[in-house]
Amino acid sequence: MPRWLAAAVLASLLALPAAAQEVGYPNKPVTVIVPAAPGGVTDALGRTLAQRFSEAWGQQVIVENKSGANNQIAAEYVTKAAPDGYTLLIGPEVTFVANPSLYPKLPYDPVKGFTPISGLVTINHALIVNPALPVHNVKELIALAKQKPGELNYGTFGIGSSGHLNMELFQALSGTKLQAVHYKGATPALTDVMAGHIQLMFISVGSAVPQWKADKVKLIAVGAAKRMALLPEIPTVAESGLPGYEAVSWFGLFGPPGMPTDIVSKINAEVRKIFADPEIKKNFLERQYFESITGTPEQLTKYIKAEEPKWRRVIHDAKVKGE
């Protein structure tokens, strides 16, 4: 073999590991599955992550909305996808801690059917009422509800949704009886609270505050464990007469089962970097009243295990059945 040819072959062989490394994850478009329609907080979260992933990785990151069946459609799609990191799920808490108790059979295993990657955010819920309702705090609401059992209507964004289960827990702890009115989303329920067709609901703080500032609803309490730094004037439900009460939703990032640990680590590191960015903190997290819960995959798994028994008990006691 001529010397020049041998040198060329040797050089190409030596270059193989570097080339293989350059073609590492991701080397094609990544899809982020959002289990909600476009326009809501889940969609906003997915699109923020997708944009930042794309900028960091130099690859197209697509958001695909697969709403319906209390997140089951999206969850089933992801659990059956190839575990190569190219299909990811923005997973709300009900997917993992409520659905197992709401439905006798799920098309996915909430424990073994996914690879946890990182927690994302928690969303504190606000207890809002129509301005005409003669109450200004939780104690007055409970007193009125006891005077008129079953007469006050509250909105949810679907049977088994966080807005539904948070109110079931509220009723259980307060000894009140309220009437649920189920909607296909938070926005139409909020619209009916403002119009006076229903009297109250739990909704994300980020959705409640603009309407509260416009005097279209009363914001009488938040479901946070302690007063929120961005809303220090608003009391918590817990301090208003229901000790231990919390109304908090959370989201995590998941992939199909069996994802390689190096890919999980890369995505996890990028999520932490994104939420540590001061611009993201100010213009996304704080604007939406989100709180970051980024951490290790193990921490996300522990979060699920800690939450599931609480909601299993609420669902069982309230005899809630998914549709």
Image: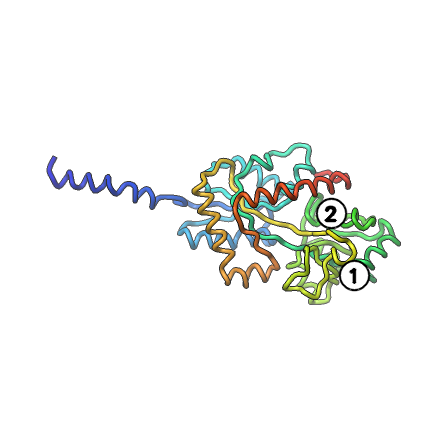
Disc 2 packing (10 Å; few <14; some 14–19; many ≥20): some
* Residue at which label 2 appears: 182
Q: Quadrant of residue 133?
A: bottom right
Q: CA distance from mark 1 to mark 2?
A: 24 Å
- Horizontal placement of 41 versus 203: left or right? left
Using the image, determine if residue 147 lies above or below residue 314: below
Q: Farthest right residue?
A: 147
Residue 65 appears in the picture as rendered: no
Coordinates of residue 213 in the picture (x, y in percent): 69, 67
Type of amino acid at the residue the image marks with label 1? Asn
- Horizontal placement of 301 versus 220: left or right? left
Q: Which residue is at a point 14% across and 39% down the rendered structure image?
A: 5
Residue 226 appears in the picture as rendered: yes
Q: Secondary structure at mark 1?
A: loop
Seen from the viewer's position, the closer of residues 67 and 243 is 243
Q: Which residue is at a point 85% across and 51% down the rendered structure image?
A: 151
Using the image, determine if residue 61 lies above or below residue 313: below
Q: Which residue is at a point 83% across and 48% down the rendered structure image?
A: 175
* Residue at which label 1 appears: 137
